[in-house]
Image: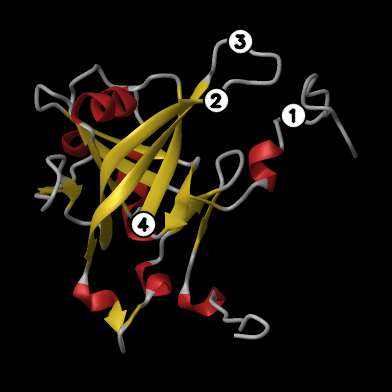
Amino acid sequence: MFYETSTNAHGLPHDPFKAIVTPRPIGWISAMSAKGEVNLSPYSFFNAVSERPPMVAFSSAGKKDALTFIEETGEFVCNLATYDLREKMNLTSAVLPRGENEMKHAGLEPAPSRLVKPPRVAESPAALECKWLQTVPLIPLGGGEPSYYLVIGQVVGIHIDDRYIVNGLVDTAAMRPIARSGYRDYFVATPETKFSITRPGS
């Protein structure tokens, strides 16, 4: 099949776009407002975008609390969402009144960060402390008001649970991180599905 996205006339019961660009890492973003309010939200349009210096980016549909808080204070944390935390991660996607703490709503414990003010999720095996660099409005072809905003941050500190450092390497699969697909679907990384390939010439 083929369809043009301008009309989205694919004839399927649901838009297949997000089922094709998959699996997508989940940016479980904790942020704090200038008043000290805490927000924790999962974003499936998320990834690392630079290594030196390390940078990450996530895309927000509209100016939600996380985006607003980050622009107020210039800081945020990306917490690793794992299979064991999947239900609590899902609870943090609930639409709550501004200022209501999703971390508390989901029964998660905050842990202090080292270099930024927003707390990290204590139960998460890894977290990236970030300083906000810029927000880029994603303006569509033909112009018009953006529906999404890309938030870019530089990673200034990294937390890793020592249990997942094996022979000097991070055992990512043992953490069982989850990733988003289309519809209501997710994927999970496991040691059984991990494989290695050596690049030509390396």
Residue in front for this viewpoint, 119 or 155: 155
Q: Left or right: 34 with respect to 40?
A: left
Q: Which residue is mark 3?
A: 144
Q: Residue furthest right?
A: 1
Of the two numbered discs 3 and 4 in the rendering, the one whose residue sits closer to the viewer: 4
Q: Earlier in the sequence, mark 3 or mark 2?
A: 2
Q: Earlier in the sequence, mark 1 or mark 4?
A: 1
**Residue 153 location in percent, x, y?**
34, 42
Instruction: Assess disc 1: are there few (<14), some (14-19) or many (≥20) residues with their C-alpha within 10 Å of its C-alpha.
Output: few
Q: Residue at x 57, y 81 (%)?
A: 196
- Whole-Å distance between the Cαs marked 3 and 4? 33 Å
SS at circle 2: loop
- Residue 160, numbered label: none
Q: Residue furthest front?
A: 52
Of the two numbered discs 3 and 1 in the rendering, the one whose residue sits closer to the viewer: 3
Q: Earlier in the sequence, mark 4 or mark 2?
A: 4
Quarter of image, res 38: top left
Residue in front for this viewpoint, 156 or 45: 156
Q: Earlier in the sequence, mark 3 or mark 4?
A: 4
Q: Earlier in the sequence, mark 3 or mark 1?
A: 1
- Whole-Å distance between the Cαs marked 4 and 2? 23 Å
Q: Which residue is mark 4?
A: 53
SS at circle 3: loop
Instruction: Assess disc 2: are there few (<14), some (14-19) or many (≥20) residues with their C-alpha within 10 Å of its C-alpha.
Output: some
Q: Which residue is mark 2?
A: 138
Q: Earlier in the sequence, mark 2 or mark 1?
A: 1
- Whole-Å distance between the Cαs marked 2 and 1? 27 Å
- Whole-Å distance between the Cαs marked 1 and 4? 42 Å
Q: Which residue is mark 1?
A: 13
Amino acid under disc 4:
Pro
Residue in front for this viewpoint, 192 or 57: 57
**Residue 158 location in percent, x, y?**
24, 60
